[in-house]
Image (spheres, rainbow, N blue to C red):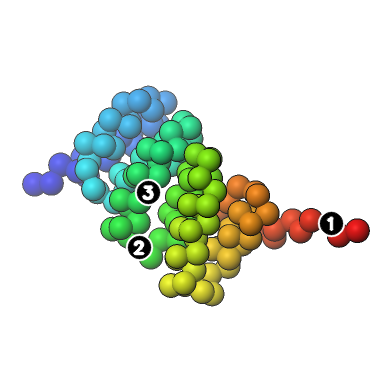
Amino acid sequence: LNPAPVYFAMAVASEGMEQSREAQVLYRRAGDYPPALINLGVLMLERGGNDRAAEALRRYIARVPQDLSAVVLLSIALYRGGKAEAAKGVLKKRLAQRPNSPLLKRNLEKLELGEEPALSLQPVAKPESK
């Protein structure tokens, strides 16, 4: 019997009760269970733990490579951690595999303009030309 789904469910419940430290511990106990990894990454992003978020998100992406939103979350964690070039590299690497992805393209554009990546597909604000 795999205990990871149980730890995951307990972690989600802990988050619902605003016990984020307990949720973090439980997500980690779930090991490489993908839902726990993505939730841990988001939780750490919310708490400002950018390096830990990036670690969890990398592990998640290794198991669920088709999830482009996780790639954007990883780029956010890297950007917030002061690693804008690494964030660009993550997006460029995935864009080589998925060249038609508007989500990846827009976020690379945002990084090129010095802006934080985002999960929305809002148009990138172009600098005004004079």
Amino acid type indicated by mark 2: Pro
Question: Image point 46% across, 58% down: which residue?
Answer: 90
**Mark drawn on residue 49:** none
Label located before the other in sequence (3 or 2):
3
Cβ–Cβ below 8 Å for labels 1 and 2? Answer: no
Q: How many angstroms separate mark 1 from mark 3 (CA)?
A: 35 Å
The residue labelled by disc 3 is 57
User: Counting residues from the N terminus, which is met first, the one under dot 1 or under dot 2?
Assistant: 2
Camera-nearest label, 1 or 3:
1
Compared with 70, 16 (above or below) is: above
Query: Residue at (40%, 44%) from the top-left corner?
Result: 54
- Position of residue 129 relative to residue 74, above or below, is below
Q: CA distance from mark 1 to mark 2?
A: 37 Å
| Disc sitting over residue 128 in the figure | 1
For the C terminus, which image quadrant?
bottom right
Q: What percent of the width, then of the height, locates residue 65?
A: 35, 63
Q: Is residue 108 left or right of residue 47?
A: right
Q: Residue furthest left?
A: 1
Q: Amino acid at mark 3?
A: Leu
Residue at 58% over, 60% down = 108
Label 1 vs label 2, nearer the camera: 1
Q: Amino acid at mark 1?
A: Glu
Residue of label 2? 65
Q: Residue 83 placed where, x, y %?
A: 50, 45
